[in-house]
Image (spheres, rainbow, N blue to C red):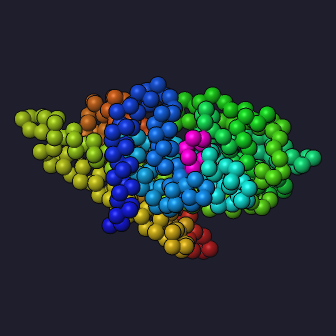
């Protein structure tokens, strides 16, 4: 059961998603246009500052508060939810966790306000899961500057008009990975046009290229060679956030079906009268409920300072599976209308699959769970 403070936040974001996001997001999605006005209003609500201290412009909340907001947004639309998730857990959080006080003061007030967005450049075109083995981007010190060369792929929030900084993982030595902050507009940084995506069409995802891109030596985030450890921690936390997005999508499928089966009739009855439909929706609700408990548990352990790697992997695995299964079943319940983009479940179906891939595939989650159980040592 949520505390009064958490429940108040949840209800506030639920109302915003229903009253502000839902009426307009379909048009943004169809046009594949970033919803700047919606993001601006999210910033005014303080959503981008939820887990950060007030001294950096934050709301003084915690990571679980962020997850509650992500779930409620994703019940209506995943593009908006993933924009918030990436901006906070991938863009701003590494600066807060690993940055110097000077870096925090320089960047966090801009990011926590939502007026500007941050991004995290990790994935490369030739390597996804195998980050250490597949990384080709390099950063070399030259006259007090880092000189960066390489390419990053599938980077969320990297090319919007309000993107201000990108944390770039790069090789700074033999198998030595470091993270370097690159401000938007830095000479040598090229931002490609938007990808043509299957889903998340109202979010920003691009490829980035670095050609002799120079930034000051002081833009190193944390210690040199700490980049690998940094992104492992970042992804562990991010998996809880992605689980929350997945639960929101799964629950959104239930919400839409409950409305539809009361109005849609067949053979003299609302289709919700038929047991085949009832059982399908019951299974959908069970998936959403159990997945929510999984991410609640992982977040609880994280906030308590306990190990949560296994729990985060479990939450991400079961919730992304639930999102995919519920999206498929919701489309089936809607029949032909479920294949139409004007209906939310059509968007949900397109958005669900990436949740089984982003921030660690389902196969990676199983590998992590098995490793935490000690099976990798057999």
Name the outermost residue toward the front. Answer: 55
Identify the residue shown where x is 86% and y is 46%.
Answer: 145
Q: Is residue 333 above or below residue 65?
A: above
Residue 358 location (% of width, % of height): 54, 48
Q: Is residue 337 left or right of residue 275?
A: right
Relative image position of residue 356 (x, y in whole percent): 48, 49
**x and y percent of residue 127 in the render?**
67, 46
Residue displayed at 53% across by 52% down: 49
Tell me if 5 is positioned left or right of 207 in this view.
left
**Number of marks drawn:** 0
Position of 111 with respect to 82 (left or right) is right
| Magenta span includes 161 | no
**Which residue is pictured at 84% across the width and 51% down the height?**
217
Furthest residue toward top: 31
Q: Is residue 260 visible?
A: yes
**The C terminus is located in which quarter?**
bottom right
- Viewer-side residue, 243 vs 9: 9
Q: Residue at x 33, y 52 (%)?
A: 11
Region of the chain picked out in magenta, as a range: 111-117
Instruction: Work out whether 197 lies above or below 110.
Output: above
């Amino acid at each position: 059961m949520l505390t009064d403070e958490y429940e108040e936040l949840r209800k506030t974001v639920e109302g915003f998603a229903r009253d502000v996001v839902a009426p307009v997001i379909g048009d943004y999605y169809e046009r594949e246009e970033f919803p700047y006005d919606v993001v601006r209003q999210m910033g005014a609500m303080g959503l981008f500052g939820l887990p950060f201290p007030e001294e950096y412009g934050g709301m003084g909340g915690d990571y679980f508060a962020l997850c509650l907001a992500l779930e409620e947004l994703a019940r209506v639309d995943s593009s908006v939810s993933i924009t918030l998730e990436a901006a906070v857990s991938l863009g701003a959080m590494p600066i807060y966790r690993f940055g110097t006080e000077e870096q925090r003061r320089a960047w966090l007030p801009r990011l926590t306000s939502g007026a500007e967005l941050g991004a995290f450049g990790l994935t490369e075109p030739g390597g996804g899961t195998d980050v250490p083995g597949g990384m080709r981007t390099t950063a070399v010190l030259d006259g007090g500057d880092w000189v960066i060369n390489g390419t990053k792929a599938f980077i969320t929030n990297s090319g919007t008009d309000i993107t201000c900084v990108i944390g770039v993982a790069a090789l700074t030595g033999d198998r030595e990975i470091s993270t370097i902050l690159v401000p938007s507009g830095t000479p040598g940084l090229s931002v490609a046009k938007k990808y043509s995506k299957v889903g998340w069409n109202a979010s920003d995802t691009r490829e980035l290229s670095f050609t002799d891109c120079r930034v000051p030596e002081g833009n190193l985030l944390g210690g040199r060679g700490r980049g690998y450890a940094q992104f492992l921690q970042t992804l562990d936390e991010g998996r809880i956030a992605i689980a929350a997005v997945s639960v929101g999508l799964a629950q959104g499928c239930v919400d839409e079906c409950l409305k539809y089966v009361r109005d849609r009739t067949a053979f003299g009855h609302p289709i919700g009268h038929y047991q085949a439909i009832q059982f399908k929706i019951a299974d959908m609700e069970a998936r959403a409920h159990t997945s929510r408990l999984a991410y609640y548990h992982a977040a609880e352990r994280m906030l308590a300072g306990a190990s949560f790697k296994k729990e985060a992997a479990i939450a991400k695995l079961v919730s992304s599976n639930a999102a995919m299964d519920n999206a498929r079943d919701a489309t089936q319940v809607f029949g032909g209308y479920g294949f139409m983009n004007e209906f939310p479940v059509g968007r949900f179906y397109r958005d669900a699959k990436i949740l089984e891939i982003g921030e660690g595939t389902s196969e990676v989650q199983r590998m992590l769970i098995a490793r935490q159980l000690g099976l990798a040592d057999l």
